Image: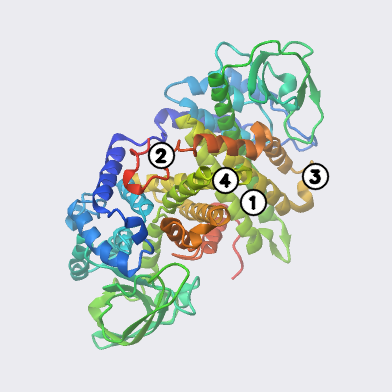
Amino acid sequence: MDFRLTADQSALVEAIDKLAGQFEAKPTEFRGFALPGGALDKELEDGQYFDIAQVPELGAVCAAMAVERLARLPCATEVALSMLVRPQLAGEWPRPLAVVENGRPGRFVATAGTILLIEGEDIRVVRTAAGDTEPVDSLFAYPMGRWKGRAEISPLSGERSANVRKWLRIALAAEASGLLQAALASAVDHLTQRKQFGRPLGSFQALRHRMAECAVLAGGVRWLALKAADTAEPGDAALAAMHAQESATRIVYDVHQMLGAMGMTLEHPLHLWTYRLKALLSELGGRGGQALAVAAECFAGKDRITAVPWAARGPAPQ
Amino acid sequence: MHFAWNAEQQSFRSTVRAFLSAHLPVDWESLAHGPASEAQSSFSKRFCGQLAEAGLLVPHWPKRWGGRDAGAWTAFILAEEMWEAGEPRGGQYMNVNWIGPTLMRFGSEEQQARYIPPMARGATIWCQGFSEPEAGSDLASLRTRAEKQGSSYRINGQKIWTSYAQHADTCFLLARTSPGRDGISVFLVPMDTPGIIVREIPSLIGEGDLHEVFWDNVEVPGSALLGAEGQAWEIARAALSLERVGIPRFALATKMLHRAVAMLERSGRFGHGAIEQAAKARAACEAARFYSYSIVDQREHGIPTGPEASAARFATVMAERAVHEFVVEHVPEALSGGEAMLLAHHQRAIVAGVASGAAEIQLNLIATDLLKLPREPR
């Protein structure tokens, strides 16, 4: 265990932070449901940032940090799947990447170059052709789209499919981590500025404690996401996605309570984070789906800690 | 940044496990029914002596005091293995974690020479005289007073919730020498001093854990004062910052969750509701673990720890809650004559948000220092 960043990793984190700094503000007049991130996408392409997971000095943990940082921006850009899942697909696959789960509309589907089609246990990877997709109006703060094409290819093998699913979970957790931090920061701003009963809302203990609990949950999501990106263990990925969806469910509700009616408007940017989080809640089977993965990977005698008497415990954890 | 144990960390953990295998009796789990019980306290004295001989009691202490200057990771790996095994050190974990280091920092040469070597040998038990009937979370309002009379102090008052008081040799006592927060001082008081009366409070959390301690004209020499008069707030803050990420509660919680799940699986009762609840609890444990590790890593590299330590503590409280609620719902027999270790865990888990200070105080600190929310009016 050593959580210090190397010089290369620090430099990358700084570079991403500097780039993100240019996209921090929501355009004042914007009133849409999802803020497109085309200009950021181009900057990331030009700077070859989508390949950082494959750079040995940086690795997937750095990619996860980049995903997290960029998710904190008000605009929605397809970063997580490109940075964390695409390196796991054999061959060249055009980005953006999108997931279509059991025929439902998915994030970035309308503009995707590559789509991962999930049907029950099967995952198929397809390159999109003209007319395969169409945009869908949505409350979610991602550009949503529907897949209309036909996939006449065979699904990935069980092993490759499990690997893709694992990295989808890691990508989900890293993205959620950034979104949670930004949603909390937005609520903190409101609670600091908005006064009632003659004092800032954020000075009332009932709200302070709720916010503090949310902050603890969000911090936990971050650690589990980074750990899973580093170890690439399926159990770690399942725990990270589980904690992300569980925490997001609560935090999205709580931060909206903090904002009151202002949080219901399209003028305030809060929804640009909370309605991305809500889009993540159902993915990969939701909490029930993550729970089955945790049960398969962490329980059932697979984990180091089992029900044997303490004296007969196994070797030290890896 | 990497999340794998290095060779040194793995090897140290193996050493500790091998020691536990060799020194804990086969029926240890049925004995480990309360860190302050008669049975465990007498076992712990023998066990800590053996740990000390093996160089595993205070490896993170300076060489001068019997350690080997090992880092924060060594101390925490040791703490994890001990807590996961049911804390066979009993109350002596406090000596190792914070009382010893606090005396090294604030104690006089005489106090250090008197008190630190027995701790390093594993031969002494301390208790912590902080809480009072009228001073819990509002510790600064404590009333127990120490009046200077010539070269000595006369102590009068009452402490409560004092763990290990019946077995303790010495008390780390907070008492008032003048009014206000700056009027609180720390005294190191032998528990056999005339005028100290200890009474056990029967409780849900195991034999010998809670006591009230009455101080009736207890006379101590001026040399019992730790640091200067009025320095208690500074000393207690330093001590509590070591304690905030002190007990790796998530380690035993995780182990007990796995044990409960294994029991359910064996009897074919690990169904939908239980699976989801267990997975959430497992994730909460893992979050608490890495939150705590992040603080340990800062200590290891000499980075001052900030409000994240409060967040780590609260994450641990959440994990303990998730696991013990899982057990109560799905393995309720644990509270009615079932497995001793599940019961022992329940009794430790229910105090996670209370022992070493109400967790709500940590939420206040997180709101102010981590989130930077405006303070409450005073």
Q: In whole angstroms, how far apart are the C-alphas of marks 3 and 1?
A: 17 Å
Q: Is the residue marked by circle 4 packed among few (<14), some (14-19), or many (20+) residues within 10 Å?
A: some
The image shows residue B237 at horizontal and vertical percentages of 40, 64
| Callout 3 and callout 2 share a chain | yes
Left or right, B193 with respect to B247, comes to: left
Above or below residue B147? Residue B224 is above
Q: Identify residue for label 4.
A: B269
| Callout 2 and callout 1 share a chain | yes
Left or right, B246 with respect to B329, comes to: left
Left or right, A263 with respect to A15, comes to: right
Q: Residue at x 31, y 47 (%)?
A: A311
The image shows residue A96 at horizontal and vertical percentages of 66, 20
Q: Identify residue for label 1.
A: A188
What amino acid type is highlighted by mark number 3?
Thr
What amino acid type is highlighted by mark number 2?
Arg
Give the letter of the chain under mark 1: A
Q: Is the residue marked by circle 3 packed among few (<14), some (14-19), or many (20+) residues within 10 Å?
A: few
In the image, farthest residue toward the right: A137
Q: Identify residue for label 2.
A: A304
Q: Residue at x 77, y 49 (%)?
A: A262
Q: Identify residue for label 3.
A: A265
What amino acid type is highlighted by mark number 1?
Val
Give the letter of the chain under mark 3: A
What amino acid type is highlighted by mark number 4?
Arg
